[in-house]
Image (cartoon, rainbow, N blue to C red):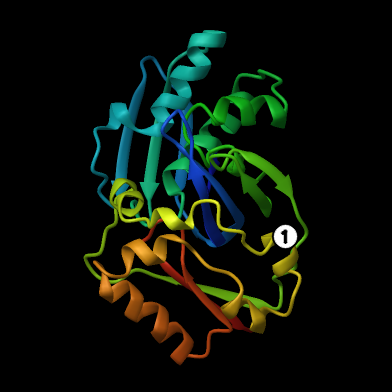
């Protein structure tokens, strides 16, 4: 079986506060982007194997989220081994959710291959064990996310009249730890516009209403990312932003 796990972008990202468990509560809108995908192939095998090509990852194959997804279902349902082949096109450490997408698609594929009969809700609960935004990619539809990014509410947002351009400055990589460590704590608890209401306003107004809090911590130490956002507007973007904790920047343009 072959699928094409896609990436996502964040329309706004509010860091609401730090939780007792060390995680942070967030508010964001996840928007799936189908123009940038990995290729994921899963076939029955005599032993568990994984091969990777394309963009070189910075972890061992056995630590990949696809393997962790298989282990999660194997421990629960004793599914047999598989051969996993992953071609990475979505950059990692970019805020695009590529690894989370791969994990969620792995769960969906294994559910189908082995007829586990898990519902989307069942899969979302298991995906959340693998990563905060993994659950989003189960249904893979625009959603307002809260909690640590795992509490999802579907919203309708018609983007058919726009094209989304995603770019990353050469050599830039932002770790999640770095992005969080630079956050200004006075953001926590600050009252923000409700993103679900703001995205219903004309997209030309988003520039002054929708913010990604991580830009305040990332831009000072990664000025090329800030420059890229400005360049998106120079090229005619109606709205531009860093996605996630960086380093990718997207611009939304009229078609």
What residue appears at the point 50 percent right and 45 percent down from the top-left corner?
17
Residue 23: % across, % down? 44, 36
Comparing 141 with 112, the one in front is 141
Camera sees residue 62:
yes
**Toward which corner of the image does residue 32 lie, by quadrant?**
bottom right
Question: Up-down: is 5 above or below 115?
Answer: below
Write down the residue under mark 1: 196
Determine crowd level at label 1: few under 14, some 14-19, many 20+ residues with C-alpha closer than 10 A.
some
Q: Is residue 178 left or right of residue 248?
A: left
Residue 8: % across, % down? 53, 56
Tag 1 secondary structure: helix
What residue appears at the point 39 percent right and 14 percent down from the top-left corner?
46
Comparing 165 with 244, the one in front is 244
What residue appears at the point 68 percent right and 55 percent down from the top-left corner?
142
Question: Up-down: is 153 above or below 64?
Answer: below
Which quadrant is the C terminus positioned in? bottom right
Residue 215: % across, % down? 40, 66
Residue 163: % across, % down? 59, 76
Which quadrant is the N terminus positioned in? top right
């Amino acid at each position: 079986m072959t699928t094409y796990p896609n990436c996502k972008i964040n329309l706004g990202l509010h860091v609401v506060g730090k939780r007792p468990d060390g995680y942070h509560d967030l508010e964001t809108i996840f928007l799936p982007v189908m123009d940038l995908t990995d290729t994921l192939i899963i076939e029955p095998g005599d032993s568990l194997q994984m091969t990777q090509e394309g963009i070189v990852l910075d972890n061992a194959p056995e630590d990949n989220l696809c393997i962790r997804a298989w282990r999660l279902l194997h421990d629960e349902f004793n599914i047999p081994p598989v051969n996993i082949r992953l071609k990475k096109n979505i950059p990692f450490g970019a805020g695009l959710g590529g690894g989370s997408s791969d994990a969620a698609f792995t769960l969906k594929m294994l559910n189908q291959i082995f007829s586990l009969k898990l519902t989307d809700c069942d899969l979302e609960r298991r995906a959340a064990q693998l990563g905060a935004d993994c659950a989003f990619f189960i249904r893979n539809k625009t959603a307002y996310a809260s909690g640590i990014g795992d509490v999802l509410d579907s919203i309708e947002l018609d983007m058919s009249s726009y094209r989304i351009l995603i770019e990353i400055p050469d050599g830039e990589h932002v770790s999640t730890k770095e992005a969080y460590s630079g956050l200004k704590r006075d953001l926590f608890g600050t009252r923000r516009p409700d993103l679900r209401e703001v995205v219903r306003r004309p997209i030309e107004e988003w520039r002054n209403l929708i913010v990604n809090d991580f830009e305040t911590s990332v831009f000072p130490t990664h000025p090329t990312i800030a420059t890229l956002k400005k360049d998106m507007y120079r090229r005619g973007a109606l709205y531009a932003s860093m996605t996630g904790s960086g380093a990718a920047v997207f611009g939304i343009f009229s078609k």
